[in-house]
Image (spheres, rainbow, N blue to C red):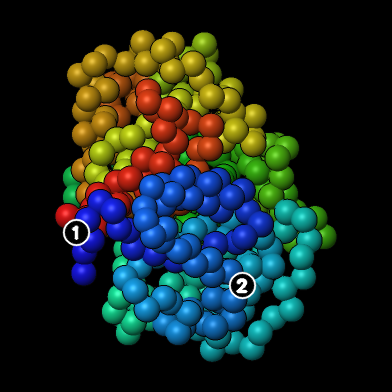
Amino acid sequence: MICNSVTTSPDYVVIADPGSLRWQHYRCDLDRHLAQFRPRPNVHLLHWSDVIERDGEIAELLPERFSLLRVESPARDFSLFRLLMRAGEVDCGREPSDWIRDEGWIASPHMLYVGLCRILANINNSLLAHGRCWPTSNLTATQTLMDKNAVSKILQVNGIPTPDAFRPTNVEGMLSEIWARGWEEAYVKLAYGSCASGIAFFDAKQGSTSSAITTVTRIGGQFYNTYDVHRVHAEELESILRFLVDEVATVQEAIPKTRVDGDELDLRVVVIDGQVAASVFRASPLPFTNLHLGGYRADPQRSRRGIADRIWADAMDICRQAAGLFDLAALGIDLAFDRHTMHPKILEINAFGDFFPSLTDDQGRSIHQLEIAATAAKFAR
């Protein structure tokens, strides 16, 4: 079913954490969009906690009229993570654990991922059963994008430039594989992590991994994320690597990134409905450019000056090609240029990479406004 008149619009159903900044910003832009229609369409907010407790079976909560469903990121609410991890345990046939919150604790990203996949799959089944509610982004593709190993394989198979990577099965084999591939530097990341959660960077030259820079610290036998990026050695490094591998990790060759003012430089490219909508340069003196880890937004003109127009155009084409492999309304692509060759490579793709509340285009439109307008145009065709 489609909308045939500019004076009408479908209702919106949004699964979100009502207390999150992500939802609050999106709601403002959605309200602004829907205010132009008469009668004004409704927005039906489904709390993530209610959806998880229903095991994703939401058909009876959906409106009768044609509607669009947006699934927002669960953000960082540990109470939601606890529910998702318990859903993962159900999916794995395990008895529920008593997940106790402890600030920064890396509980079980793998179990969180399994639980989220279960809930998304059941949401998708509910949409099929209902028949009148369409997701703005493909939920199966959303699941895939949360698995760094799967994304890396898809990019490689489709000829999209991306750093060499593999999934390790144990620490010893991982180190041997890194050395066999002749990598000079490498990242070990949680395959289902985000925001540099559970990541280690080390120098792999000359068969040595005596130390690494990481966001992970061990306290009392448990592992935690910290904003204090620090160096670890010997047994502490081995225990962190073993934890990451056991939780399912991806190992990615670290390309020598181009620099600005001596700092490492990469960028987030936001692609909406197959078109590049925005790019944000990020720089850091550290191997991690995340803003919460000491990175900063680099001056776009100064950063762009070091990239030839042809190379920039190739990079944007690569982002569009990569986005075309996943049926999402919007996604965020992390991309870097090799310092020596200037070849662009995609580092990661983020299913929930559209949250830039202060970023606007030349006409003052936010990323969410552009995304909502593109979705409306898609379903009006």
Taking depth in this image into account, of 56 and 290 the one nearest to the observer is 56
Percent position of residue 286, x then y: 59, 28
What's the residue at 52%, 57% (across, down)? 73
Work out which residue is located at the far right of the displayed protein and give it.
Answer: 220
Taking depth in this image into account, of 71 and 159 the one nearest to the observer is 71
Percent position of residue 171, x then y: 53, 57
Residue 17 higher or lower than 175, as above or below: below
Q: Assign the N terminus to one quadrant of the image.
A: bottom left
Percent position of residue 50, x then y: 59, 76
Residue 364 higher or lower than 322, as above or below: above
What's the residue at 64%, 35% (across, down)? 293
On the question of residue 258 being in view, the answer is: yes
Amino acid type shown at disc 1: Asn
Percent position of residue 200, x then y: 58, 44
Residue 116 higher or lower than 353, as above or below: below
For label 1, the crowd category at 10 Å Cα-Cα, with few meaning under 14, some 14 to 19 and many 20 or more, is few
Which of the 4 image quadrants contains residue 12?
Answer: bottom left
Which of the 4 image quadrants contains residue 5?
Answer: bottom left
What's the residue at 54%, 76% (across, down)? 51
Q: How many labels does the image show?
A: 2
For label 2, the crowd category at 10 Å Cα-Cα, with few meaning under 14, some 14 to 19 and many 20 or more, is many
Q: Can you identify the residue that label 1 sits on?
A: 4
Q: Assign the C terminus to one quadrant of the image.
A: bottom left
Residue 205 lies left or right of residue 132; in this view the side is: right
Amino acid type shown at disc 2: Ser
Work out which residue is located at the far front of the displayed protein and give it.
Answer: 38
- How much space separates mark 1 and mark 2, taking CA atoms? 35 Å
Taking depth in this image into account, of 239 and 197 the one nearest to the observer is 197
Q: Can you identify the residue that label 2 sits on?
A: 49
Residue 232 higher or lower than 175, as above or below: above
Q: Nearer the viewer, mark 1 or mark 2?
A: 1
Residue 152 lies left or right of residue 45; in this view the side is: left
